[in-house]
Amino acid sequence: MSDSWQTWAALGVVAITVIAFIVRAVRRRRASKSGCASAADCGCASAKLGNLRPGEDHR
Amino acid sequence: MSTATAAQSVVATPTDGPVFAIIGNPNSGKTTLFNSLTGLRQKVGNYPGVTVEKKVGVCYSQHGRPMKVIDLPGAYSLAARSPDEAVLRDVLLGRRTDTARPDRVVCVVDASNLERNLYLVSQVCDLGLPVIIALNMTDLAEEAGIDVNAVELERLIGVPVIRCQASTGKGVLALRLAMSRSELPRPAFEWKIPEKIVPAVNEVIHGLTAREGRDRIGAQAEALTLLSDRENFPLVGSSAPSGIALDVVNRHEEQWRKEGYDWRGALVAARYEAIGLVLERVQRNKPRIGVAMSDRIDAVAVHPVLGWFVLGAVMTGLFLSIFSFAEYPMNWIDAGVAMLGDAVRAQMAPGDLRDLITDGVIAGVGGVIIFLPQILILFFFIGLLESTGYMARAAFIMDRLMSHVGLSGKAFIPLLSSYACAIPGIMATRTIEDRKDRLVTILVAPLMSCSARLPVYILMIAALVPGERVPLFTKVGIMLLMYALGTIGAFLFAWLFKRVLLRGETPLMILELPPYRVPSLRAVAMHMFERAFLFLKRAGTVILGISIILWFLTAYPKHENPEATAAAQIEGSFAGSAGKLIEPAIEPLGFDWQIGIGLIASFAAREVFVSSMAVVFSAGDDADETSSTLRQALLDAKWPDGRQLFTPLVCFTLMVFYVFAMQCISTIVIVRRETNSWTWPLFQVGYMTGTAWFASFIVYQAGRALGFS
């Protein structure tokens, strides 16, 4: 019984993670199309501050 | 001769709060001043050209009103030769479609180099915008024996001049008060336009005022900028200069060319003549005795031979610190992660959720955050080197080498930034004027060993040279070798690309060596903690997500036999199948399908290799045992025939693979954006992955032939 609910819970977490990755990819694609420097996950400190293209203001 | 001057008048504050642009020569302390004013946290370095991006912040007037502040790229003049200089020109001229023209300008002027800095000020004065001069680095000027009379300068140029030291925050309050003034005078700086050029300027003014309804000052500024601009550097997102003005300027320039008249030189000379008159009144040079401290240090630091030793010593010191200082905190984090895993195992009944938490989340994320101390030390040192001024010296030394491979000296700063992360490095290539040089730099920048490779190197060195008796210098030596390999690889490919793909002449670099400074520990600490935050954020988001998905891929589909061992389960899983699929391609490199899983997963980001190894090998642990360290798990890993998997040779080969492999999706996306094409990022993935395979193949096979295991 314990194994069964744990399996469903684990699969639920995996499904939520996959959805989160898809949403993130779509949002980044949209941001990229609007010219925003949204490399927020690159680890680069300056990326979050935007650049001089349309839709640049991230604050 | 005609006189170029802005009409002396005052300009009132716009009703919705003024927009200030902060401008200045590279390395004049502009970004530091911007930080002081707005409190925004960003990278602060003291080598020229660090500011490429636009940065916007808000500071408050003495009455609490918000004032928007834009930090514009550093430039020596408005005659643009690179994209970042063109950004400055276009924002100030109101040509940007996405950024409104600023209402007021704060010109940051390096008091120790007044003549050169006033050149840009004189050009900005021509624009007719209200200007405040922030006379920065007055302490350095005094040290250099230069005495600047700020009151006289204010009188001669007709704008407020505020003495300040951005690094210590001295004078920033006075600057904020000046910015808060409801009315600011327009500049009254005068210089004489050469007589031969006056008709062209007047014709442009007449055309623009009569036919486009522009004001006289703006029309004159447009004419002078067009006449100074060598190539009228175009920029995406900027409106083109007026066609009327261009026609007039082109016609006159054609005529001057025929006559052999150097109109640009004449304009520059005329400005410097006027600046010279100002300097005579405001600047006094005290006689200097002996050689300045910076010059004495530079006699060694940039010496053709000794300079290399200094650079080598600095790099050795950096890696020694990484290995020695980080050991204890790493052990604490490691023990904490292991305790957490054991606690979860003790509290939860066996099942998939428990496995997901222990083998996926804790092992995956814990395997990466253990490297936080190293990341902190790395960025502390990088910040320290930037802050003291040594980075510019390193650029100077490397320029000699880089010119041999056809790279521009300006490529050094992007390449240096790539040691931290290739993405800011690739963005920093915008300072390179020549398109081919810029492209070559973008193509080789990811070969510099970024901080994401550090966890992979450290893990492999730990597995490669296990035991406490191994001298520290051996580990440092291997690490230096990996960094050197990446750097040499970058230079070799740059040389190849410049000769085969993107031929062109090697440009000359003019690099300013700023004086050595006592580093601002606050700025260094801010930079370090900002990077630590980003590292942890990444571990808590992307790496957490990938670890969860990777756990699923190693746990499913379930083995037919519920009693099957964990190793058999992984072998039959989705991840195991993918690893087995590429195993024939990586077996000649000494890698098995389990390493293959790590190679595939780390295409998302290099450090994922560590978390994926943690997931793959911790899942192989007996569930009832306490978790072993990842290093021990790797050392225990075996081939099916019982041979050790992670032999010293395999560890070394794996490091070589990671030196060359292009495993970072974010970098690929940025290269696509910067080159505006998929061709170059795909080419980059192809050549780097191919090189990684061949280099690893040679290392592994040669190592075996020489009798290494």
Image (tube, helix red, strand yellow):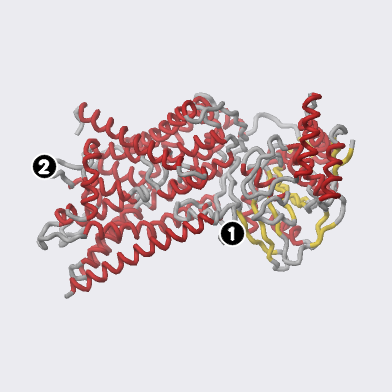
| Residue bearing the label numbered 2 | B641
Alpha-carbon neighbours of circle 1 within 10 Å: few (<14), some, or many (≥20)? some
* Subunit ID for the residue under disc 1: A
Looking at the image, the residue that sits furthest to the bottom is A1
Q: Is residue B104 left or right of residue B631?
A: right
Asked whether, in this view, residue B548 is left or right of residue B646, the answer is: right
Q: Are marks 1 and 2 on the same chain?
A: no
Q: Three-letter amino acid code at disc 1?
A: Asp
- Residue behind mark 1: A57
x then y, percent, for residue B325: 38, 47
Amino acid type shown at disc 2: Asp
Of residue B406 and residue B339, the one placed in the foreground of this image is: B406
Which of the labelled discs sits on residue B489, or is there none? none
- The quarter in which the C terminus of chain B is drawn is top left
- Residue plotted at (63% across, 50% down): B237
Q: Nearer the viewer, residue B40 or B87?
A: B87
* Few, some or many residues within 10 Å of mark 2 (<14, 14–19, 20+): few
Q: Nearer the viewer, mark 1 or mark 2?
A: 1
Instruction: Tell me the chain of label 2.
Output: B
The spot of residue B128 in percent (x, y) is 80, 50
* As drawn, B367 above or below B501: below
What residue is at 81 percent from the left and 24 percent from the top? B259
Q: Closer to the camera, B613 or B561?
A: B561
**Inter-mark Cα distance, 1 to 2:** 58 Å
Q: Quadrant of residue B62?
A: bottom right
The secondary structure type at the circle numbered 1 is: loop
Residue B336 in sight from this viewpoint: no
The residue that appears at 53% across and 24% down in the rendered structure is: B304
